[in-house]
Image (cartoon, rainbow, N blue to C red):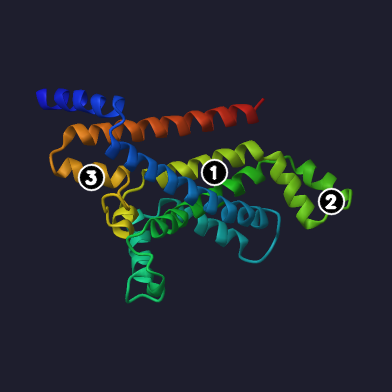
């Protein structure tokens, strides 16, 4: 018990004094997650919109595949990406392994199914009368998609925020693709795993508290956005 108390005290000191190592890890974690979220959303939201507003053979099957990928293990994504970007892989020439860029790609792959699926759900909840009104007014397919997305903007923001939460909290893909290299690819989740195994409880607790605060901020944002959408 005393070890835990000492760890909490040490963690408080590390956070309040803005320990350089803690700040570096936190900054890298946030920057990678933000870039991955923006890239993932730029792909997933239009993709979800196109699937939602079009009728084509196999649509139901595609939606089921997307929903199944919600729970794909991060280590599975990490393994597949590792095989692609390792030196012997087809994308090895780009030297993405053990780099922040490689970690961003891994996070994007994790985010895509979640944001796409949430986009589908958001657009499905838009009043059908909106579709019919826009079509009757002669809206093009692109205009229809844009207006429907505007109607569901709060739900789409919540979907993107959940994607960010997925990116910042994963550990399996980050270790396999990033390698947990100090000063280069060490992020909050991988650092917590390493420091705990080394017995640096205070440092681990400090990083864990920061990760929890970020998760809390994301959840509060999602709740606020959903509340705005229901008013």
Residue on which the image places disc 3 = 193
Residue on which the image places disc 2 = 135
Residue on which the image places disc 1 = 160
Question: Residue 198: x percent and y percent?
Answer: 13, 43
Question: Residue 46: x percent and y percent?
Answer: 64, 54
Q: Nearer the viewer, mark 2 or mark 1?
A: 1
In the picture, which quadrant includes the N terminus?
top left
- The secondary element bearing badge 2 is classed as helix
In the picture, which quadrant includes the C terminus?
top right
Q: Residue furthest left?
A: 2
* 132 vs 5: above or below: below
Question: Residue 220: x percent and y percent?
Answer: 49, 28
Task: Give the total number of marks visible in the rendering.
Answer: 3
Mark 3 and mark 2: span between their CA atoms? 53 Å
Report the front residue among 168 and 100: 100
- At x 43%, y 49%, the residue is 32
* 160 vs 82: above or below: above
**Res. 203 image quadrant:** top left
**Side of 20 where 218 appears, left or right:** right
């Amino acid at each position: 018990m005393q070890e835990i108390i000492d760890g909490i005290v040490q963690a408080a000191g590390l956070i309040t004094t803005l320990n350089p190592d803690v700040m570096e890890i936190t900054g890298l974690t946030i920057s990678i997650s933000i870039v991955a979220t923006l890239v993932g959303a730029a792909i997933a939201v239009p993709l979800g919109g196109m699937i939602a507003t079009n009728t084509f053979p196999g649509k139901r099957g595609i939606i089921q595949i997307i929903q199944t990928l919600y729970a794909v293990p991060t280590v599975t994504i990490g393994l597949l990406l590792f095989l692609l970007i390792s030196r012997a892989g087809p994308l090895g020439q780009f030297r993405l392994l053990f780099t922040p860029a490689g970690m961003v790609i891994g996070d994007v792959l994790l985010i895509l199914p979640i944001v796409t699926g949430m986009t589908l759900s958001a657009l499905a909840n838009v009043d059908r009368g909106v579709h019919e009104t826009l079509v009757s007014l002669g809206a093009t397919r692109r205009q229809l998609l844009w207006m429907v997305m505007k109607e569901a903007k709060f739900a789409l923001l919540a979907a993107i925020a959940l994607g960010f939460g997925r990116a910042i909290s994963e550990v399996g893909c980050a270790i396999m693709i990033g390698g947990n290299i100090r000063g280069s690819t060490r992020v909050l989740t991988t650092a917590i795993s390493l420091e705990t195994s080394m017995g640096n409880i205070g440092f681990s607790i400090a990083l864990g508290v920061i990760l929890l605060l970020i998760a809390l901020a994301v959840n509060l944002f999602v709740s606020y956005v959903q509340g705005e959408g229901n008013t």
